Image (cartoon, coloured by chain):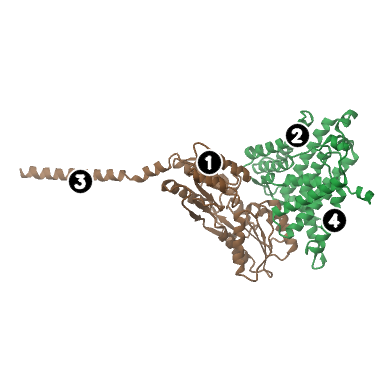
Chain colours: A green, B brown
Amino acid sequence: MTRLLSHLTQEVIVFLLAATLFLAAAIFLPGFMFKDGAFQAGNLIAMVRAVSVLGILAVGMGIVIIGRGIDLSAVAVMAMSVAWYLQMLNSGVPGWQALGWALAGVVAVGLINGFMVAYADVPAIFVTLASSYFVYGFVRSQLIVSDATPAPAGSWILELPNLGLVTSTHIPIDVYAFGAAVFVGFLFLRFTKWGRYIYLMGDNFMAARNMGVPVRPMTVLYYVISALMAFVAGILTTSSIQSMNVRVVNSNMLYDVILVCVIGGIGLSGGKGYMRNVVVGALLIGIMGNAMTIMDFTNVEQNLIKSIILLTAIIIDGLLNPRDEQTAQQGDI
Amino acid sequence: MRLKQTLAAIGLAALGTVTLHAAQAQEAQDDPGPAAYAAALKGKRVVLVPMAMGFDLAQGWNAFLKREVEAWGGVYDSRDPNWVTDAGTQALTDLVNSEPKPNVLVVHSPDLQSYSKVLKKAHKEGIYVVLIDNPMNFPADAYVGSDWDRLGQLEAEAAVKGCANSPKKEIGLVQGDAANATSILQYNGIKKVLAKYPDFKIVAEPFSNWDQTQSRTVTATMLQQHPDICAIIDFWDGDAVGAAAAIKEAGKKDQVKLVTTGGGAASACKALEDGTYYAIVMTDVVGESRDLNAIIKYLLQSGQPAGTSKTYIYTLEKATTKEDLRPGLCWSVEDLQAGKF
């Protein structure tokens, strides 16, 4: 029994929790999975779709956290880069040129985050918090005119949803993109030497450096990856809403991204976790959000329930996996 | 001799007439209006604190008030809390404690309660408080804006009309949030109207938290649960694009009529034209701003101490559909900022 319990990592706990919630919703909530006794896939697809953008951001965030960093600028980069890109398109900047500028801006933010953390030794939490405010403030005040920036008619972004619908399954493009992001993240972490470096750095930064891992360029690299993921997430958001509203920067979204990573089992102390944790975390959030929407819960009530579930997962994890000497030495971020 | 007298008499009479005319002219020049107007208004400070500057209505009020206040010799300023309630409270606290103090605060409140304490302090300092568009549990000197209960009724009437040919009379709501007066009152208004139509039923009423993506997600879920919905009322056109996207993705653009409300910026007319919205209850932003300006001028001249009057000025609202579209119905932020209104 004890042996069995010790296998209960947070990941397994959350997976069991998600599975339980899923079953409970499927049985007790009409319309979640069965409607009038018949199986319906529509709601499940909508559910996964609702967390796809969150999941893509969490893939970037997950890679950064595994490398023992954190990127609080992800949501700001997502909203502001795409809003600026749309603004350029609306004011007549040629498509490729606008895309080039936007991507250059995104990479620049990633580079600055990485350089400040890796070379100036400023804690990641402060660097990325500052860059989040800077990116938001600069773009909002200097580059765009309104909170909401519409995508120009005929833009390629508006054509993206049709890519998903042409397949016979009618699965939205967001879901494919989330799957692709997870798969690429998995290949990167599992099969490239840079991926292995990130685990080494997250596990024991000094040891990794002594081994000869290029820790500083690697740090810069994962912040750039996170920024690029954020841009992809922004494009997908725009493709379905047909505009980008930068109000999202003031929302809870960033916490939800971190929540997806942490609740899925990517330890904030670094070096732990896989892409599958992102999927589990995103699914749990998706199931809860969907079930609570069906039950007409307000946002305040939803946040309350989310926080209780997160606390429960953390407490169970703390009881079953007590902190050892190594985590005590390193501390969390 | 007689002639001389006559001439003198005529001369005197003429002189008299002239003097009389002159006196009358003098009297006309002494109209006390302009002087009193200038004395009461000159140099008075008006500050607008909307929930955020980045959306159509706030940009409308801001452009209009700036032009008017500066034209009557006042000093105009604005703050941008950017949807953060704490930042709004902070801005108001700073304003109430600043020197020189503002004379009028135009406040767009995020909820019923948060600003009450600081606005009470403003009244104590002799600052008039005018609420714009969002009601509060606070006795402001004036409220200018929508009657949200009535607005909800108009939305519900439009939805009922939109459902006329549908076999099932199911309506879905996408509410804002549970603390905001505009959301609560719209809900009440909708309920009132639907009580008169017993065959209509609200089948789902999730919250968007005024966020587009959230609106899309909850609408997609709603359409999955209740495929026969004939109309959806989304409580703000700032997030209704999300609901519209979900309806379109579900392939139900013809079946589901989307009703919403907003400031009547150009994007709203476009959405009516292409059928994204079936009806939108538009706020006449220029009319509303003119009411606002008038009540500010009235308060400053009235001599009424701050916090002692209570006036409600509701903006005329109308559910606009595709049939009502005409050029110039909607306004653009660019035009407003360029002073074209």
The residue carrying mark 4 is: A19
Q: Are dots 2 and 4 on a single chain?
A: yes
Q: Secondary structure at mark 2?
A: helix
| Left or right of A23 in this view: B228 | left
The residue carrying mark 1 is: B96
Do the residues under discs 1 and 3 have CB atoms within 8 angstroms? no
Q: Amino acid at mark 4?
A: Ala
Gap in Å between the C-alphas at discs 1 and 3? Answer: 57 Å
Pointer 1 local density, CA inside 10 Å: few below 14, some 14–19, many at least 20: many
- Of badges 1 and 2, the one in the foreground is 1
Q: Nearer the viewer, residue B250 or B239?
A: B239
Gap in Å between the C-alphas at discs 2 and 4? Answer: 37 Å
Q: Amino acid at mark 1?
A: Val
Gap in Å between the C-alphas at discs 2 and 3? Answer: 87 Å
The residue carrying mark 3 is: B17
Q: Position of residue A111 (x, y in %)?
A: 76, 33
Q: Is residue A213 visible?
A: no
Please, is residue A333 above or below residue B303 in the view? above
Q: Nearer the viewer, residue A289 or B111?
A: B111
Q: Earlier in the sequence, mark 2 or mark 4?
A: 4
Output the chain of dot 1.
B
Output the chain of dot 3.
B
Q: Position of residue B48 (x, y in %)?
A: 54, 44
Q: Secondary structure at mark 1?
A: helix
Q: Nearer the viewer, residue B164 or A326?
A: A326
Q: Amino acid at mark 2?
A: Asn
State the quadrant of the C terminus of chain A: top right
Q: Are dots 2 and 3 on a single chain?
A: no
Pointer 3 local density, CA inside 10 Å: few below 14, some 14–19, many at least 20: few
- Of badges 2 and 4, the one in the foreground is 4
